[in-house]
Image: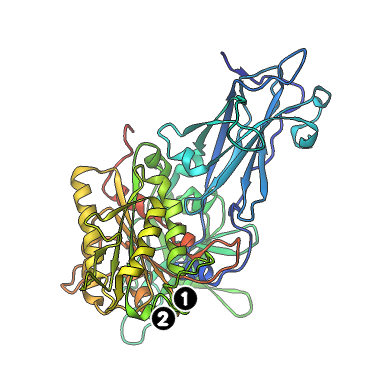
Amino acid sequence: MGGCVSGDLKGGKQAIGGVHGRSTMNNDAGYNEAIDHFFRVRDQSPLFTPIELSLSASNLRNLDILSKSDPMAVLYVKKMDGTLEELGRTEVILNCLNPTWIEKINVSYQFEIVQNLVFHVYDVDTKYYNMSVKALKLNEQDFLGEATCVLSEIVTKRNQSLTLNLHGKNGPGGSKNFGTLTVHAEESCLSRMAVEMKLRCSQLGNKDMFSKSDPFLRISRLTESGKYVPICKTDVINNNLNPVWRPLYLSMQQFGSKDNPLLIECFNFNSNGNHVLIGQLHKSVSELEKLHKERSGANLVFPTHRGQEKVLKGQLFVDQFIGKEQFSFLDYISSGFELNFMVAVDFTASNGTPRNQDSLHYIDPSGRLNSYQKAIIEAGEVIQFYDSDRRFPAWGFGGRYGGTLSHCFNLNGTNAYEVEGVQGIMAAYANALHTVTLAGPTLFGPVINTAAQLASQATSNDITKYFVLLIITDGVLTDIEETMDALVRASDLPLSILIVGVGNADFKQMEVLDADDGCRLESSTGRVATRDIVQFVPMREVHSGQISAVQALLEELPDQFLTYNRSRNIKPLHS
């Protein structure tokens, strides 16, 4: 049967919804120390990707006596507390059981969150045709069916389309046929726009006593609240008052629009984190482009206590400015690229005896998850949609396995290192607590090398695979040099390493591995990492409904994935 497309109909042309700024999906507002710290030390602001959903349906039920149903679709997101938040409505299409709606519904896609979508389809009563869809009371319309899915299920499909069976309010099952609903996702073209800039400064002020300044730039954008939020920073150039930085990429997601005011600050790097401001200036992307065209510099200024600005001798120049449309994370994913999830669990004695309630490995009979279980579930439930076979390598380290101390053993107690699904990891972890004796010390090197070996094999066989290793640990490393060597070697591979710290240990070491101070990791032989592949965040007990530390950690993954592929000029399949 042919579809019906809405034309110039009475009523129903308006749609509501779309989430502006930081999405609230599964994320009721609330302060979270771990998340605040995570973004603060990285000079970053949370990002989302704007997506338009197009809807069509087939074989809808006919509830009208003298004509066919007049359908309208409504989209909700299901929040953590189970409540539904409406995101938008389509228009009403008259007299049609196979509608193709014109009105798109805007959704903010966030990689790091499982976004549960609920679709309701209604037959709108003829007496409401002159009303806008926004004003319609849904309890006065006839219910035609509902369908549910996760947003990630749509965007990971090759054509970014997913067909769902509609069912009644009592859920799937029963003999009634409610028809189907097809959802197609399309990324806003704006989210693909980016600029590449090569920035340099001249005649910077010297802030060091015994050498020259070690400058870096931090760029922030002005938000609707009137605050500046950091969006990126350059690398650090040591001992140089006329620095030229590596090219910088800024996406439209980061700067909003070419006319949005940006604050560009130049700091002198200090290893203790107390960076000293050298000077700053306000420029939009358009104004930076103008500086490049005119080949002119802009003077830095220094804010004074009286709210005035002192003009400095130092200037900022834009040596290169290229506007480009780049492939997005979803371009790669929908063409067949995958994220392969791996887990490594710390079985060192500092976790405490698992049968004791104060142990970090204690499994509560009531079902309350410990920190290890939370990290596995929260990371796994997100990444599983990007891994087609859902077979995950899972290891333990720092424990006696079969009577022998091992720093990388198969979590499931067999010769096979892979387990089936997130629940497979959870089951293997629970069983290992009965068969593995906690020992020590805490070594990361063997697990990282094992993960790197899998990633290395993939690079020669299949460019579409990118690996993500989640290490959950409670302690201080005893093989810091070996770990840094392993990480520097692995920085050339399609691999990201997420470290979650549980318990109350001093995790300063992990911040060193994270290399977020602007300096890349260096191996014992002096080799420098090609990119930063490690992200660390301490686990925190958080209130229900807030974004968790693990979700904040996951948010960086799409960018790391893109950095790897772009640096090697790897394009989406069939592009």
Res 296 seen here: yes
- Percent from the top left, x then y, of residue 402? 22, 69
- With 162 as the anchor, is 244 left or right in this view? left
Q: Which residue is mark 1?
A: 277
Q: Residue at left 34%, top 38%? A: 336
Q: Which residue is mark 2?
A: 505
Residue extending farthest right: 127
For marks 1 and 2, the one nearer the N-term is 1
Res 286 seen here: no
Closest to the observer, 293 or 266 = 266
Secondary element at image label 1: strand
**Contact (Cβ within 8 Å) of mark 1 with mark 2:** no
Closest to the observer, 246 or 139 = 139
Q: Split into 4 quadrants, where in the image is the N terminus?
A: top right
Q: Given the image, on which type of amino acid does mark 2 rest?
A: Ala
Q: Is 120 drawn above or below residue 127 in the view shown?
A: below
What is the CA distance from the residue labelled 1 to the residue labelled 2?
33 Å
Closest to the observer, 262 or 353 = 353
